[in-house]
Image (cartoon, rainbow, N blue to C red):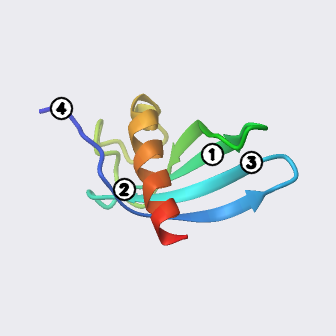
Amino acid sequence: MAYTPQVVDAKIVSDNPKNGLFEVLAVLKDRCQCRIGFERTPSGEEHATHVNRLFTEPCPVCRKDFLCNCMTKFLPTIAEQALQIVKTKA
């Protein structure tokens, strides 16, 4: 079975308007939490730079309870869903 991340909640946890960087905390349907780093281009477009899984639950992909890079594969999907939720809350 292939893993399909579904973001159920997201909020901006830090924002630096001077350099255009901000971070979003995303909670996935499987209770996994991820911190996603974004940068704003001069035209105002948001671009995801990295994702880190917080160690609240084991990784839903490899089931490791320590550092892994599995969520990097799903960065575009998670980032898009998280931005949609953040923009609807604003």
Hey, which residue is sitting farthest top in the picture?
A: 73
Instruction: Please indicate, yes or no, whether residue 20 appears anywhere in the rendered image.
Output: yes
Q: Secondary structure at mark 1?
A: strand
Which mark, by number, is residue 21?
3
Residue at the (73%, 37%) spot, across then down = 41
For the residues bearing labels 2 and 3, Cβ distance under 8 angstroms: no
Q: CA distance from mark 2 to mark 3?
A: 23 Å
Residue at the (46%, 65%) spot, across then down = 88
How packed mark 3 is, by other alpha carbons closer than 10 Å (few <14, some 14-19, many 20 or more), is some
Say whether disc 4 or disc 3 marks the residue closer to the N-terminus. Answer: 4
Q: Quadrant of the N terminus?
A: top left
Three-letter amino acid code at the position of disc 1: Gly
Instruction: Kindly identify which residue carries mark 1.
Output: 37
Q: Position of residue 89 (x, y in %)?
A: 49, 71
Three-letter amino acid code at the position of disc 4: Ala
Instruction: Kindly identify which residue carries mark 2.
Output: 32
For the residues bearing labels 3 and 1, Cβ distance under 8 angstroms: yes
For the residues bearing labels 1 and 4, Cβ distance under 8 angstroms: no
Q: Quadrant of residue 2?
A: top left
Which mark, by number, is residue 2?
4
Residue at the (57%, 56%) spot, across then down = 24
Q: Position of residue 3 (x, y in %)?
A: 23, 37
Say whether disc 2 or disc 3 marks the residue closer to the N-terminus. Answer: 3
Q: CA distance from mark 2 to mark 1?
A: 16 Å
Say whether disc 2 or disc 1 marks the residue closer to the N-terminus. Answer: 2
Q: Secondary structure at mark 3?
A: strand
Using the image, determine if residue 60 lies above or below residue 30.
above
Three-letter amino acid code at the position of disc 3: Leu
- Position of residue 83 in the picture relative to residue 14 (left or right): left
For the residues bearing labels 2 and 1, Cβ distance under 8 angstroms: no
